[in-house]
Amino acid sequence: MNTNRIKLAENIIIEGEIITKTGLHIGGNKDTLHIGGLDLPIIKDSATGKPIIPGSSLKGRMRSLVEYSRGKYDLYRGEGHPHGSREKCTDSNCPICVVFGSIKNPNTYFTRLIVRDSIAIDDDSVDTELKMENYIDRLSGKAGSPRTLERVPTNTKFKLELVYSIFDENKDRENLRIIFESLALVEDTYLGGHGSRGYGKVEFKLNRITRKKAETYKSGNEGEDIINSEEGMSIAEIMSSEEYLDLIGQD
Ligand SMILES: [Zn+2]
């Protein structure tokens, strides 16, 4: 038997905001939330009632966009799948699988990236808007009955928090760029539903990137701020900063 001791080197904590630039719709459960003829409600935090962007939604979107971008997306076309269905990645050296997690990749003993649920930041409450959407039934070609869609309005801010763990000093550090690359891809496309019809444009503003080495946890130390910006930095600004290049091991 081959054993390799693995050890956490550090956690990188990335904090900031997700700001909606158009209406955003991330669907909730319409079985439990059927209020006043609302056909397609958005998902909300059960404790506070505030809109949320589930970590799984953002993470899934980040992953599939970076997979497309790096040519890792295998499409299977065949019976019952006229538009193609997604094949699971089988590349055992795939860095995207290491970052986002995969049961097939032997290097993913520990999923490196955690994406927390993002809850809307507000002083009072976020008023969602309702939009009537007509849709065309693809099979009959006829207009279906209009549906009422709930969405988060433009300029709503959500708290963003990502935690990235570095084990392997070289590859994991270098792979940190996959996160920023995928966030940039989300910005230039969309998040949530109905994106090709104009929904879900978002912008990321990062306020803080903190490095916590494994040793700092023993002392309860707060770690070292790599970036600390009250007004927030864009993904492009972060990626061209010296602090970022140093963090991913490039100078
Ligand atoms: Zn992969």
Image (tube, grey):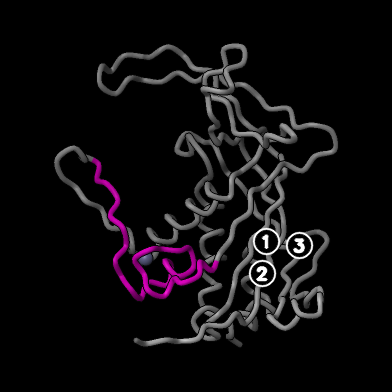
**Residue extent of the magenta highlight:** 83-112
| Circles 1, 2 touching at the beta carbon (< 8 Å) | yes
Rate crowding at label 2 as few (under 14), some (14 to 19) or many (20 or more) other CA atoms within 10 Å. Answer: some
Query: How packed is label 3: few (under 14 Cα within 10 Å), some, or many (20 or more)?
Result: some
Percent from the top left, x then y, of residue 7? 57, 82
Numbered tag placed on residue 234 in the rendering? 1
Task: Name the residue that disc number 3 marks.
Answer: 207
Q: Residue 122 shows which numbered tag? A: none
Residue depicted at 48% across the width and 39% down the height? 195
137 relative to 215, above or below = above
Identify which amino acid the numbered label 1 is placed on: Ser
Q: Earlier in the sequence, mark 2 or mark 3?
A: 3
Amino acid carrying mark 3 in the image: Asn
Asked if residue 93 is among those painted magenta in the image, a careful observer would answer yes
Reading the image, the residue beneath label 2 is: 238
- Give the secondary structure at mark 1: loop
**Ligand 1 within 8 Å of the CB at mark 2:** no
Some atom of ligand 1 lies within 8 Å of the CB belonging to the residue at label 1: no
Residue at point 31%, 14% (across, down): 142
Q: CA distance from mark 1 to mark 3?
A: 9 Å
Left or right of residue 31, residue 9 in this image:
right
Quadrant position of the C terminus in the picture: bottom right
Q: Looking at the rendering, in which quadrant would you find the N terminus?
A: bottom left
Name the amino acid, label 2. Answer: Ile
Counting from the top left corner in percent of width and height, residue 119 is at 70, 44
- Point out residue 6 in the picture as x, y percentages from the top left corner: 52, 83
